[in-house]
Amino acid sequence: MIKLIASDVDGTLVSEGSDRINPEIFSVIRRLKERGTLFAVASGRSYSSIRKLFEPVAQDMIFIADNGSNIICRGYETFSAKIDPETIGELVRYIRENRLGYPVISSKTTVFVETEDPEFLDLMINGYHNHVRVMKDVLEADETIIKAAIFRRPNIRDIAQKVTEDWKDRLHVMAAGDPWLDFVDYQADKGYALKSIQKLLGIKREETMAFGDNLNDLGMLESAGESYAVANARPQVRQAAKHLAGAYTEDGVLKVMKGLLENASM
């Protein structure tokens, strides 16, 4: 029997940066909980952003935020990683000097940016629903930083390989949606997060189902006995997953979850 379901958000449940989710998922999450199956959402977004998205069922869920840097299980924080200030300083200067895009750094509660680009700020505030603070220098932020990122339009694919090679010995680097390249502590990863939840709750890998679309979902899919890539997923993700679900535009994840309710043997 499946006891835990974990799903990515952007590109898997909704379009990138969207807050438009099919409200039917809330009743499905409640019904799954009644039959003994917990739902976890795993995202590169902040906790406040994904909690707002799932507000009607937030108390019944598990949140894996900032690509595994922050885990909130039934209202209690069970894990939090951080990046040391020296590393953050070097990374931000590297982004600036190489003109790679907008440097973005995040604490548990606030996203710090240096640009006043109205389109970008609209995405961050009205799309992701982040608490955003615009600063002349993000390195003056006086909070513990748990994630850093590069935002680059139209996407980060032209720089991802070089940047990953430059930083792979310092931080865990991962693509997290077309315009995003994320940097987190090596302890932080959706896969590690899912394993820690499995251990905490006594749930086995074969009792876990996961859904994803991008490279930052690979660890999570590997940690689940029943892994699904959505139809719009990156080729590497489709290859790694055991099953294929419909695209987010077709509510593919929701359909699989509803099928789980109808199949008493799963």
Image: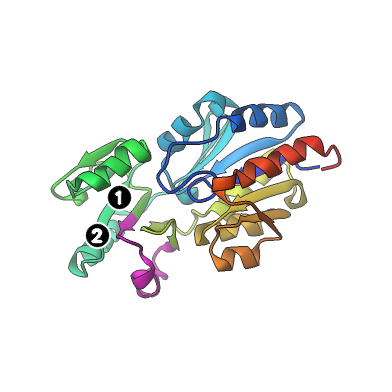
Residue at 19% in and 42% down: 134
Q: Which residues are magenta?
A: 149-173
Quick one: 34 or 20, which is closer to the camera? 20
Q: Is residue 127 magenta?
A: no
Residue 63, percent from left and from top? 53, 38
Residue at 65% in and 31% down: 29
Residue farthest left in this picture? 136
Q: Is residue 59 left or right of residue 200?
A: left
Counting residues from the N terminus, which is met first, the one under dot 1 or under dot 2?
2
**Snapshot quadrant of residue 130:** top left
Asked if the residue under mark 2 is in contact with the one under mark 1, i.e. CB atoms within 8 Å, the reply is yes
Residue 51: assigned label: none
Question: Is residue 143 visible in this depiction of the protein?
Answer: no
Residue at 39% in and 68% down: 157
Residue identifier under label 2: 92
Question: Is residue 240 visible in this depiction of the protein?
Answer: yes
